[in-house]
Amino acid sequence: MDKKEISGRMDKTLGALQAEFATVRAGRANPGVLESISVDYYGTATPISQIATIAVPDPRTISIQPWESNLLKEIERSIQASDLGINPTNDGKVIRLAFPPLTEERRKELVKQVKGYEENGKVAIRNIRRDYSEKFKAQKKKSEITEDDLKDYEKDLQKLTDDYIKKIEDLTSAKEKELYAI
């Protein structure tokens, strides 16, 4: 059993989940919320971070300063079209995003969204477990491993799965605390 390979796949799932959590805004300015927004840059969809300087001057504001002034309108349009829910202000040189404090209702919606990401992460981990479990059973069927080896591998695989599920739950509870912090 190649634990490194299995852990590597599970780590990728964990990384993807953390990236999804970063896009959920928690009432404070986080440049990660802009990761999923692309701008049409000379006919190519380009992430904002690749065509502008992004700064967080205070906990509730993100400023975006494009390297080319003709991109201001395009960036503004992309932010408005996104599901960010924030109206950008454009002063001719810099676009500012002011993050209002979250309402209780919005916090609950975001927690529900985070729970959905958590469930998707758990499903992905379980799918990895299933893939390797089937692989081990196929090896047993071909007599490449013994019955005892199969039992040991499945036990180790289940422990690894449980560890990663626990990590996902810990990440989720940390994100929930962040969302409910005022």
Image (tube, grey):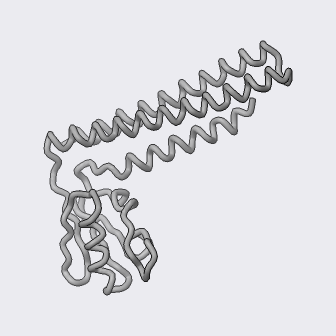
Quadrant location of the C terminus in the rendered image: top left
Residue that lies at the very extreme toward the right in this rendered image = 143
Determine the image quadrant of residue 76. bottom left
> Eyeballing the image, is 27 above or below 55?
above
> Eyeballing the image, is 46 above or below 21?
below
Residue that lies at the very extreme toward the top in this rendered image = 148
x and y, in percent, of residue 13 in the image: 53, 42
Determine the image quadrant of residue 147. top right
Viewer-proximal residue among 58 and 160:
160
159 sits left or right of 100 in the view: right
Residue at x-position 45% and y-position 43%? 17
x and y, in percent, of residue 1 in the image: 75, 29
> Eyeballing the image, is 98 above or below 69?
above
Viewer-proximal residue among 172 and 133:
133
Residue at x-position 28% and y-position 51%? 25
41 sits left or right of 77 in the view: right
Determine the image quadrant of residue 49. bottom left
Residue at x-position 16% and y-position 51%? 101
> Eyeballing the image, is 74 above or below 100?
below
x and y, in percent, of residue 123 in the image: 49, 32
Residue at x-position 53% and y-position 31%? 164
x and y, in percent, of residue 58 in the image: 24, 62
What count of labels does the image hold? 0
